Amino acid sequence: MDVVTVGHASVDLVRAGGGERLQLGGAAIYSALAAKIFSRAGIVTRVGRDFPREFYSVLRNAGVDVAGVKQVHGKSTSFEIEYDGAGQAHYKSYRLGVGVYLRPGDIPERYLTARAFHIAPMAASKQRSFLEHVREHTYALVSLNTHVAYFQRYRRELLRLIGEVDIFTINDDEAMRLTCTRSLEHALNALKKLKHNIVVVTMGVYGSMILEGGEVSFSPSVIQRRIVDLTGCGDAFAGAFLASYLRTENAVKAANIANSVAAINASDWYFRALARLRFQSLEAFQEFVVARQRRLSKNQRSLEHFIA
């Protein structure tokens, strides 16, 4: 493996357009599907007996190794998600299920040769246990992201973890909440004062800010004809950033790639746009993005001419 993602995989009940279906989800899933675009990727997670067999095929067919998916007695992590007419997701309920019992010992031995690990949002105490295990048994890079739901209980622990991982990603709203500030500028200044290696603050359609060595750089996002589904975009960014950074060792270049991957993820439902992507080089992916952007720009110009 090049990249291993650790975290929740979920069986989600999704309602949209008057119908409903079971759908594969979870932060670790989106991160792995983004990382596999440029690298050999595997996933470490726990699922219950209710985890559909076809979900394994979805991951294998997309190019994600599933040796680290451990099926145990009990129910899988699950979310109930309802999409409104504008395509906005509303989370009605959730159940962590057997995912709460995920532990470092679930990492397959052959995964310990991976070049990088991404620790998806979980309780910060559990994230630390995975970080310490990886540091003890590997020389891998470690990235980590979190979720606002963990801030109230784990804020101090998360602030310490920022300086102990190689890459920490968070969105702009979460950055302000974690640092107890009221603007992104103040949040970045607060993060500068903390021990850190690479901190990336994502800003949705606007791009991302990269904090490294106390210096801040900006990486713009790419245009989209329309946004379909924002689910998992932050997790996809984290996986793509880590896989790209392994190749470039340049945070700004990695952010440029990850911005594009997140934007592509948002252009279709759930992770459908990511599942079919696979590139042997970052250059080939960039050529794909340029061609895609030229096509979108041409369509936009044609639309403007029509309206005029």
Image: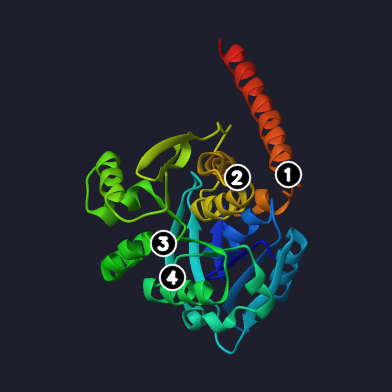
Q: Write down the residue under mark 3.
A: 146
Q: Give the mark nearer the N terminus: 1 vs 3.
A: 3
Residue kind at label 3, given as amino acid type: Thr
Q: Write down the residue under mark 4.
A: 122
Disc 1, disc 2: CB below 8 Å? no
Label 2: how many Cα within 10 Å (few below 14, some 14–19, many 20+): many
Q: Position of residue 296 (x, y in %)?
A: 64, 27
Secondary structure type for disc 2: helix
Q: Write down the residue under mark 1.
A: 281
Q: CA distance from mark 2 to mark 4?
A: 23 Å
Which picture quadrant has residue 281? top right
Q: Residue at x 51, y 44 (%)?
A: 251
Which picture quadrant has residue 65? bottom right
Q: Position of residue 106 (x, y in %)?
A: 58, 82
As drawn, 145 above or below 300: below
Whether residue 19 is visible = no
Residue kind at label 1, given as amino acid type: Ser
Q: Which mark is residue 261?
A: 2
Q: Give the mark nearer the N terminus: 4 vs 3.
A: 4
In-front residue for pair 13/167: 167
Q: CA distance from mark 2 to mark 3?
A: 19 Å
Q: Give the mark nearer the N terminus: 1 vs 2.
A: 2
Q: Give the mark nearer the N terminus: 2 vs 4.
A: 4
Q: CA distance from mark 1 to mark 2?
A: 14 Å
Residue kind at label 4, given as amino acid type: Met
Secondary structure type for disc 3: loop
Which picture quadrant has residue 40? bottom right
Q: Residue at x 67, y 36 (%)?
A: 286
